Image (spheres, helix red, strand yellow):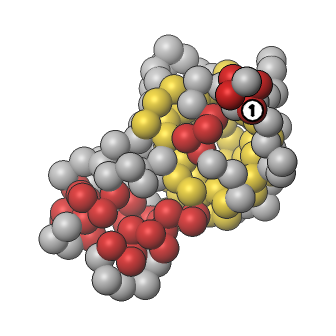
Amino acid sequence: MAREYQSQFPFPGRVEWIGVRPGRGKPMQAVNSVAATVAGALQGDFFQGPPSAPRQVTLIQSEHLAVIGALLQRPPVDPASLRRNIVVSGINLKALLGARFRIGTAVLQATGDCAPCGQMEENLGPGGYNAMRNHGGITASVIQDGEIAVGDLVQPGSSK
């Protein structure tokens, strides 16, 4: 019975923020839209992984920005400090693990958890790593080229 419920989503999610990192060690830059390609990932992002790369795109829930901030005893964190590409609201990203989903005209495959790295201690301060544990979002591969823009819907169950 639970397996049946795992594919049911009452509402689509929504893209709230998009960021790309133009180079190693460079800060994230917010953009209004981005091209996602099977061959490389997100246009303008430092990471340009091959089609088989499971971490071409990183996503985090906007609801978790407030949780991470609360665990650090401050307001919601700035998504640029987390080094994630796409912030979405209104959908449980962990429920998408292993599934395909559409954002704008692109189709992605959720490939795994996006665990925090030691950089979170530097970006968020002491406790940043632990504040992000289980709130770091997911990784994904691009399955179908397309454009992703702020305001686009995140729709589970899309196929090629």
- Front residue of 60/42: it is 60
- Front residue of 50/79: it is 79
Say which quadrant the C terminus sits in: top right
Q: Is residue 15 above or below residue 98?
A: below
Q: What amino acid type should be assigned to the residue bearing mark 1?
A: Tyr
- For residue 110, say whether it is visible: yes
- For residue 141, say whether it is visible: no
Say which quadrant the N terminus sits in: top right
x 83%, y 48%: residue: 10
**158 displayed left or right of 2:** right
Percent x, y of residue 155? 80, 41
Percent x, y of residue 152? 80, 53
x 67%, y 60%: residue: 89
**97 displayed left or right of 124:** right
Residue farthest top in this picture: 52
Q: According to the image, label 1 marks what residue?
A: 5
x 75%, y 46%: residue: 154
Question: Which of the 4 image quarters holds residue 37?
Answer: top right
x 69%, y 51%: residue: 91
Q: Is residue 156 above or below residue 149?
A: above
* Element marked by disc 1: helix
Question: Which of the 4 image quarters holds residue 61?
Answer: bottom right
Mark 1 is surrounded, within 10 Å at the Cα level, by few (under 14), some (14 to 19) or many (20 or more) other residues, namely few
